Image (cartoon, rainbow, N blue to C red):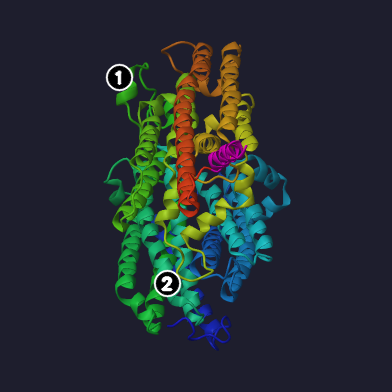
Amino acid sequence: MSGRAGSNGGGEPEPGGNGRTVRLALAGAGAAVAALVIAMVAGGAATPRIIPGLPDQGMLTRWGLPLSKLVMDVTGVLTVGALLAAAILLPSDKGLLGRPALVYVKAASWLGLVWAAAAAATMVFSLSEALGMPVADVLGGDELTSYASQVSQGIALTLVVLFAVAIALFARGAITVGSAGGLLVLALITLLPPALTGHSASSPNHDLATTGVAVHLVVLALWVGGLGVLCAHAVRRQPHLEVAAARFSALALWCFLGTGLSGLFSVLARLTSVSELFTSAYGALLLAKTAAFALLGAAGWWHRRRTLPGLASGGSRTFVRFATGEIVVMFAAVGLAVALSRTAPPPAILPVDRAFELLGYTMPPEISLANLASLWWFDLFSGTLAALLGGLYLAGVVRLARRGDAWPWGRTAAWSTGVLILVLATQSGVARYAKVLFSVHMAEHMTLSMLIPIFLVLGAPVTLALRALKPAVRRGDRGPREWLTTILHSRFVRFAGHPAIATAIFIVSTYALYFTPLFAEAMEEHLGHIAMTVHFLVSGCLFFWVIIGVDPAPHKLPHVARLVVLFVTMPFHAFFGIALMSMGTVLAAGWYDQLGRTWGESSLADQRTGGAIAWGFGEIPTLIVLLALAFQWWRDDDRRARRADRRADAVAARTGGSGDAELDAYNDFLAKLDKRDRAE
């Protein structure tokens, strides 16, 4: 189908389009519900064993909970898909949404309301199941308020209700691509809280399971939601189908890979042996979901080979028929996922060890250099982050090389060094001991915030991306390069990139983390560790971007001012280290006491060691920054001198003088004096 075919004035659906959309929605919903019912019956969740004398929530909760959760998941995925189509898949005009995109933003508003209502219903049914009380008793009591504000699962659903309502409200007035993109990010975040408090939080390797399910949800929502809205776009005969389909095809490939890898890691975190795939109801549902995943991969390959090339020549019927079948399989997979969340994983034989319950691994032996170097621990989040940073940078360098453009090897070396240190700090034995010893945690903190960012900002990733990414094909549209430029020129980046703000974040956040209850709360949860890792990296990159950044910055400081900012900032970390060494109480004492460490020095003595590390660590980054700053200063002066020489040569060639205005004026003055002396 061409960009003009099938539209009435560029945005109104053809007659019968709404009916076809309803049939598509009914087919997807029917597949999801059928898969859910079959999986619950086969897995035993539909007919649980009722023990006489114990409270029973009743049939309404038994079926109402999975159905309401299914509606919550489906509407959340469709909200993501609608916002994805508006912000990325459909072309825009100088930052403004087109008419079809505005329709999807408005649809996201209504979907957000249904999403919030389904989350509220899920909260009621979840409490009914937890307490073994009928729904009527739950609604008539005071337990619901406590559940929503004090229990982790209730808090997660409360966040979904609040965020979904916010999406519904803000989407009503969204008319720009930037606002649609911001709502898309919020929708993806809203998907995460319920899943992160389910089976993943209680699995043997909860770190791997938590990160795996988060990545799985994000990429799956983009994939399923994007295809669902793309099919609705096709059956409604809307314009720009070939553009949206081509963009979604490139995104779907990455979503397919991300879904497969994250799903694999989630399975590894929940199952202890391959045989459990064939001997448990949980494993059988996993196999069924894997089969659906493989079928979707084959369908995506067929799309890229056969149906997408035909769209440009007007052949949209094959695409619609094939994509409709793909939608049915996708929503059946969503139903299987809901049934899977209602089925308990096979019981794992775990050591009776409090440290294992908290860490996901047994207490490591006494710390030594050999153990730090050998006891590697795979962290999915940090490993994925390092792989993305290294892979995307290398892809940019390769693209420039194929184009014949040179890229300084020093920048590549600096970026590679930063990524390598990131791997060592988060995947080696340092990662194991960082949760056990405050001193190792502080060494990791200093490395993440004060060493790795130096090499990353010297790698000039933004400059590389701007040179490697191609401009959008359509004038006024937004591709990856335009999105990056828009973010760089946004008010938020201008505010955060101000030297005073970046310095304040770098200094104040450290004191706010450790001298408030935040540190103790962050140590208790895997998400807290992820948040600390991200914060350390981002705050460090922001600060050193101001000092030695090669990439363009909203506020450019002279070199002398950069030196002043550096020398003013570093003593605050020394003061922080001294404060830690002077403390008589242990930070996050509850966390360290629960671990039951029996070797090494006491927690208070180890904390003082961590303070000494914070006090002395700043010398190494300061030296590296001074060397980099001195080199940049010399290069800048050298460029200015050469620029002045070229300007002087141009002036000399044009006027016949030396090219130096001051020297020419002085020679003229001497010539006049000589002429006057001769006249006398």
- Nearest the viewer among 166 and 572 is 572
Q: Position of residue 440 (x, y in %)?
A: 45, 22
**Residue 673 in sight here:** yes
Residue 245 numbered mark, or none? 2
- Give the structural element (helix, strand or loop) at label 1: helix
**Residue 44 in sight here:** no
How packed mark 2 is, by other alpha carbons closer than 10 Å (few <14, some 14-19, many 20 or more), is: many
- Nearest the viewer among 156 and 232 is 232
Quadrant containing the C terminus in the rendered view: top right
Which stretch did the figure color magenta? 661-680
Relative to 173, is 533 on the left or the right? Answer: left
- Nearest the viewer among 371 and 346 is 371
Q: Quadrant of residue 514?
A: top right
Examine the rendered structure and indicate whether residue 678 appears above or below residue 611. below
Quadrant containing the N terminus in the rendered view: bottom left
Q: Position of residue 479 (x, y in %)?
A: 48, 63
Circle nearer the N terminus (1, 2): 2
